[in-house]
Structures are given as structure tokens and as C-alpha cells.
Amino acid sequence: MDSYAPSNAEEFSAVVSDGVTYAGRRDLQPTEGAYTWLDLSNNDGYPGATVCGVAISSQGNDAWVKVLTTTGEVWQTHCDVPGTTFVCNEDWVQQTTPTPSQ
């Protein structure tokens, strides 16, 4: 699981459970609210059951969820997050796979 609070008003989190990736958003003010979770595994291009790690970041009206597979591939999807809107319906796009230096 990974979480990021870009301000004292909201928090974004991502979690992988049994190869399924979820992204969530919750309000932090005036009190800590419940998460709204979205299943990102149904987005086109999802790398599947080999997903084993997740990260989330946010800046302005954008958030990105990145996953790592057991074969070392890195994939990313984008979310729109203006105000309290939380929409993550874009395709997964493979990123450059890290390679060990020698």
C-alpha cells in the first residue's frame, strides 16, 4: 500500500490485493472521511495477476498510479482529481523497465 496527502484536506492511497489494484481518495477536513475506492484492474492494458507492488502520486488535478509486476515490468495509469472528483478510467501504459547496473 502507498499513500500521499498533497494537502491537509485530502489523501490518496493505492493498494494491491491478490493482483487487483485499487486507488482511493478521502477527505481529511473537517474530519477524516471514508475512502472512495476504485478498481483499476478493469482499465484497458492492466498487466494482470502478476502485479505485486504499487505507488501513487498527485499534483494539482492529476494523480498517477504505478504498479510493478513480478517480472519487473512497470505500468502506469492516470487519474483526474480536480476538487473532490476522482476518476481513474485511462488505459495502463507500460513504462521503461528498470535494468540492473553492472
Image: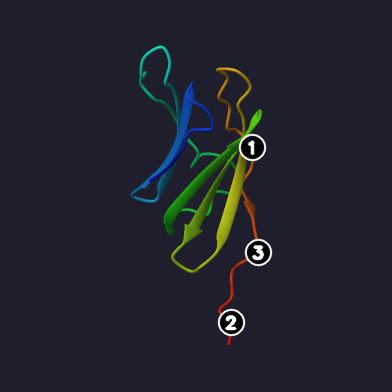
Which residue is nearer to you in this view: 46 or 27? 27
Secondary structure state at the residue bearing disc 2: loop
- In this figure, which residue is indicated by the disc labeled 2? 101
Crowd around label 3: few <14 · some 14–19 · many ≥20 (10 Å)? few
Q: Which mark is residue 90?
A: 1
Mark 2 or mark 3: which comes first in sequence?
Answer: 3
Instruction: Count residues near mark 2 (Cα–Cα under 10 Å), then give few for <14, some for 14-19, many for 20+.
Output: few
On screen, residue 17 above or below 79: below
Disc 2 to disc 3, how far (Cα)? 14 Å
Image location of residue 23, percent across then percent down: 47, 36
- Comparing 66 with 4, the one in front is 4
Front label number (1 vs 2): 2
Which badge, 1 or 2, comes first in the chain's sequence? 1
Work out whether 52 lies above or below 60. below
Tell me which corner region of the image, top left, top right, bottom left or bottom right, holds residue 77.
top right
Could you tell me which residue is drawn at 55 percent across and 79 percent down?
A: 100
Q: Residue at x 58, y 27 (%)?
A: 87
Give how far across and how far down residue 24 sits, in percent. 45, 31
- Which residue is nearer to you in this view: 60 or 65? 60
- Residue 69, x across and y down, in percent: 47, 61
Q: Quadrant of residue 81?
A: top right
- Residue shown at the point (58%, 87%) measured from the top left: 102
Q: Name which residue type carries label 1.
A: Glu
Q: Residue at x 50, y 39 (%)?
A: 40
